[in-house]
Image: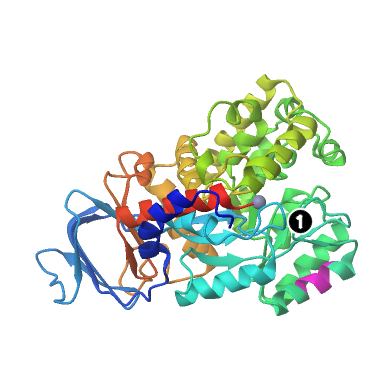
Amino acid sequence: MKLRNVGLLLALTIIAAVSVAAVPPDETLGFVHATVIDATGSPAQPDMTVIVADRRIVEIGTSASVKVPKNARVVEARDKYLIPGLWDMHGHEIFGAWLPEDEKVTPLLFVANGVTGVRDMGGDLEPLKKWRSRIASGDLLGPRMVIAGPMLDGPVPAFPSSAPVKDAADGRRIVDELKANGADFIKIQSLVPRDGYFAAADEAKKQGIVFAGHVPDAVRAAEASNAGQKSIEHLTGVFEGCSSVEAELMSKPRGPGRGRFLSTYDPAKAKALIALFLKNQTWQVPTLYWEQGEWLIEQTNAGPDPLAKYAPAAWRERTWPMFTREILKSWSTDPVADREAFVQAEFKMVGEMHRAGVPILAGTDTAAGVRVYPGFSLHSELEMIAQSGLSPMETLQTATRNAGVYLGLSDTGTIEKGKRADLVLLDANPLDSISNTRKIRSVVINGRYLSRSDLDGLLHTVQLEAANAK
Ligand SMILES: [Zn+2]
């Protein structure tokens, strides 16, 4: 950190010192008179008391029946709404020079926004492993992490933090190495060749490790689903798979305009593909907020950015302008009307998949999307998932209950006795409007209580760091 702004630094150190210091969460908490929205799908339960001790939810019941232990910090939650901590199911936290490691930016932005878990979809394995274990032990404040490490990509990867795959042998070897080195799952990128993909899929199954990610350009969505890919990100391969000319669209993946995707859309093929996803339980992480950013970048990247103060120079001055140039050059070259129609088709697709029973997850691609800020963007994603036709409860579940189910983690995703104490207290009812998830009064992360002023302290810390980090 360069000390360019000493006055601000001094002013903020006092606030920040309280918040960022690693404190073992040994406190007992009692939320009283809260309306609990447990995300199991049950209706909201008014006037409840929730007790947290030893990083767990140890008791839940009506405020009339549950006694708050004497040693507890009492949190008055009348007219407030307690939801499970949120998961961003598609993030990138440490990604070579594009998103340099900075523990005072990304983890804190997540926490300040109520995101207490993140599925890291690709990054630098060794530093990510350090964060993962420091966060788990309480030494670093940040969301619980499930990490992929380097992404399997083609022989000449398009991104940093990648493992090049030229053939089947590479696919198998890299899966073995990542598993042995502590990756939680395998991330697939777009340029993995067919033989490398199917070999990696087979090896992942043998090794008992999940593989997830893009449907590679050389693979059909139906094939990926049948191969056991657990989730498809950004609806990759989906519109190709719904087209009457799938082979043509696949033969030049960056070529045909979005208008061609829409004009060859075949509802019967769509129905069959969705049915296959349901049968195979192929989860969808549509990253709608960033899809809109990508396809309509002239609009989403225009005008003032009120969150710019939270973006380190590396994002603001290097990485995001680079993405913008690439997108304008190679992706967003179609007529804007076609791209707008395509984004609308993506919303409709998510609604159709959901109604058919295909499980949906909220993910953002932060911070690898232009102006896609850790934490803040998850709330935007939830709004877009709701716009796709999910109810507020169903939308909330895409970032809570569904995340726990997908990850096979029985201790997260809902407010139930015995679960990990990751909670968000809201000033307004998210079942009235999902946008109310933004109205955060306090956060409990791994048992540690952060008041509104603590959360503001985290944001100030990020602002200071972003101003000074390279
Ligand atoms: Zn991503």
Q: Is residue 233 rendered to the left or right of residue 15? A: right
The prevailing secondary structure element of the residues shown in magenta is helix
Q: Residues within 10 Å of mark 1 (few under 14, many from 20)?
A: some
* Amino acid tagged 1: Pro
Q: Of 169 and 467, which appears nearest the observer?
A: 467
Which residue is label 1 attached to? 160
Quadrant position of the N terminus in the picture: bottom right
> Can the viewer see residue 8?
yes
Task: Please report the residue visible at 72 percent of the width from the left and 79 percent of the height from the top.
Answer: 180
Is residue 88 placed above or below 313 in the rendered structure? below
Is 296 contained in the magenta span?
A: no
Picture quadrant of residue 199: bottom right
- Where residue 238 appears, as percent x and y from the top left, is 69, 43
State the residue lying farthest toward the left.
64
- Where residue 164 appears, as percent x and y from the top left, is 84, 61
Task: Please report the residue visible at 36 percent of the width from the left and 57 percent of the height from the top.
Answer: 15
Q: Of 187 and 197, which appears nearest the observer?
A: 187
Span shown in magenta = 171-176
- Where residue 255 appears, as percent x and y from the top left, is 84, 33
